[in-house]
Image (cartoon, grey):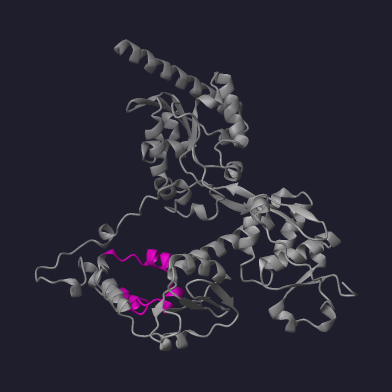
């Protein structure tokens, strides 16, 4: 580098620039601690002694369709670093996280991976957890920008038809601009942010570092008749009896209100609801016929949470935020026996399969001793996301709350209806309560099978209990329960034959 300090690398503000410099640093063998990452916009804060005299001119490598899937990075110096597609996606999203420390973290992750430390991609790892958090925040910012950008029609000729101003939390302008370019066809538009701007002329997209300000945009925007209609519609559909302020702030945070046309209306509508409008079924301005006001219980008036279309999209409780993925049940759809546990553990959360960790090994041993092949039963959990608390670098299991069990009941009921097992074995009190849909004492159900509709219900200890108490009695009880399940299944099968 022509006498430059090897510990300082310049990033030109995007992932491609960082990747090019990171590959050079890896080839040189520079450890993460030995490298200082400097963004071009912050050069003024770095002394001349810290700055390289001449940066390498190696162009960033562009992943084409062939190399992107494998996550392979290479450059003209011959270095090749192969990473998983999952890690590649995490790095690219985290690179948009607005923090001066992002490049150092990305390089530390890449350095550890290159040296064989695959745990760095896990959310259970300290660096991995930070990477996952950054990526999730960026993905949320992408969603928010698409959801909360509001265009205003412009009156002047020879200029973009629509204007918008938005203040994203992270550097997601390019992502959102590509989305709007696809959605708005040949209509021209301009989106300004404090960091830059995007212009679509109906055929090509241009990104620049020059933006403007929100006041200029609102002054240049003509009176938008469509926006006036939208405000009238928004006010007319507001039902104070159904106001749920917590849900409102969760799905439309206050920081977005100032750039929404309906933003100025929201505080007044909330104030009206608090001051008494909530007691009636609809706002007075909506009524077109006179009559008696009907008092409505606000709690009953609130709609229930919608059922998501797939388990991966489930947001009915907050467990998804800290879980790697949802863990559905698995096994043959024709299984006669279904075993239901409490929730996924650390291993299950990372692999996406139920009962593959230490508790799963205890269950495998019990199945083997009872003479039941694992691939002949359906394995699932009452709760589909891993609930945990940090304990050093480990993720420790935490029992799900009743509201979380209730929120996940839809998925368990769906599995029960699909498989229609002859025998259900519940492992632990949480699973038993989920199946019976009430709080129960496990001890009351340990001794004999219980009839549940067309099926038998057999309760026993969770395999993790056998690990905690290190007792042979719990393991024997699990084996005995599976043995009872086999006997009950045979009894039902015999009864069915006799009936015919």
**Between 456 and 291, the one nearer to me in the picture:** 291
**Residue 32 against residue 311 in the figure, above or below:** below
The residue range painted magenta reads: 242-271
Question: For the point 77% across and 49% down, which residue is it?
Answer: 116
Q: Residue 9, how many percent across, how many down? A: 78, 71
Q: Residue 121, how many percent across, how many down? A: 67, 52
**Residue 35 against residue 394 in the figure, above or below:** below
Residue 268 among those drawn in magenta: yes
Question: For the point 56% across and 60% down, which residue is it?
Answer: 136
For the C terminus, which image quadrant?
top left
For the N terminus, which image quadrant?
bottom right
Query: What residue occupies the far right of the structure in this picture?
Result: 3
Left or right relative to 101: residue 359: left
Q: Residue 312, how many percent across, how many down? A: 48, 48
**Between 33 and 54, the one nearer to me in the picture:** 54
**Between 295 and 163, the one nearer to me in the picture:** 163
Left or right relative to 224: residue 476: right
Residue 469 seen anywhere in this rendered image of the structure? no
Residue 477 among those drawn in magenta: no
Residue 145 seen anywhere in this rendered image of the structure? yes
Q: In which quarter of the image is residue 48?
A: bottom right
Q: Residue 360, how many percent across, how many down? A: 59, 33
């Amino acid at each position: 580098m022509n006498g430059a300090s090897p510990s300082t690398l310049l990033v030109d503000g995007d992932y491609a620039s960082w990747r090019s410099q990171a590959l050079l640093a890896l080839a040189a063998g520079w450890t993460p601690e030995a490298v200082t990452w400097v963004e071009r916009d912050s050069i003024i804060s770095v002394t001349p002694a810290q700055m390289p005299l001449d940066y390498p001119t190696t162009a960033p490598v562009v992943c084409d369709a062939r190399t992107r899937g494998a996550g392979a990075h290479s450059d003209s110096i011959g270095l090749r670093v192969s990473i998983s597609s999952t890690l590649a996606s995490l790095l690219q999203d985290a690179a948009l996280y607005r923090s001066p420390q992002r490049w150092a973290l990305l390089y530390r992750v890449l350095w550890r991976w290159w040296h064989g430390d695959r745990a760095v991609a896990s959310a259970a790892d300290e660096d991995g957890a930070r990477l996952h958090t950054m990526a999730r925040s960026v993905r949320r910012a992408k969603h928010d920008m698409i959801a909360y950008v509001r265009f205003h029609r412009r009156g002047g000729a020879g200029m973009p038809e629509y204007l918008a101003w938005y203040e994203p939390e992270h550097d997601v302008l390019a992502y959102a601009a590509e989305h709007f370019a696809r959605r708005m066809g040949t209509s021209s538009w301009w989106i300004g942010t404090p960091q830059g701007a995007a212009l679509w002329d109906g055929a090509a997209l241009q990104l620049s570092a020059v933006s403007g300000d929100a006041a200029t945009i609102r002054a240049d925007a003509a009176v938008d008749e469509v926006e006036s209609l939208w405000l009238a519609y928004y006010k007319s559909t507001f039902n104070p009896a159904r106001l749920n302020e917590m849900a409102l702030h969760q799905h439309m945070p206050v920081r977005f209100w100032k750039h929404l046309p309906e933003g100025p209306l929201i505080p007044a509508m909330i104030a009206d609801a608090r001051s008494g409008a909530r007691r009636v079924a609809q706002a007075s301005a909506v009524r077109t016929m006179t009559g008696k006001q009907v008092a409505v219980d606000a709690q009953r008036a609130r709609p229930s949470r919608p059922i998501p279309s797939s388990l991966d999209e489930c947001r009915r409780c907050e467990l998804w935020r800290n879980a790697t993925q949802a863990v559905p049940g698995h096994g043959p759809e024709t299984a006669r026996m279904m075993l239901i546990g409490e929730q996924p553990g650390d291993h299950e959360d990372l692999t996406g399969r139920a009962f593959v960790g230490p508790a799963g090994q205890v269950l495998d041993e019990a199945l083997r001793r009872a003479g039941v092949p694992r691939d002949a039963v359906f394995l699932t959990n009452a709760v589909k996301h891993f609930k945990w608390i940090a304990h050093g670098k480990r993720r420790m299991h935490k029992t799900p709350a009743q509201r979380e069990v209730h929120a996940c009941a839809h998925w368990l009921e769906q599995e029960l209806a699909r498989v229609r097992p002859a025998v259900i074995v519940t492992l632990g009190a949480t699973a038993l309560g989920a199946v019976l849909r009430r709080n129960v004492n496990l001890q009351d159900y340990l001794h004999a099978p219980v009839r549940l509709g067309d099926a038998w219900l057999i309760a026993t200890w969770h395999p993790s209990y056998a690990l905690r108490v290190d007792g042979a009695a719990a393991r024997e009880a699990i084996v005995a329960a599976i043995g009872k399940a086999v006997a009950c299944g045979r009894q039902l099968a015999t009864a069915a034959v006799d009936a015919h």
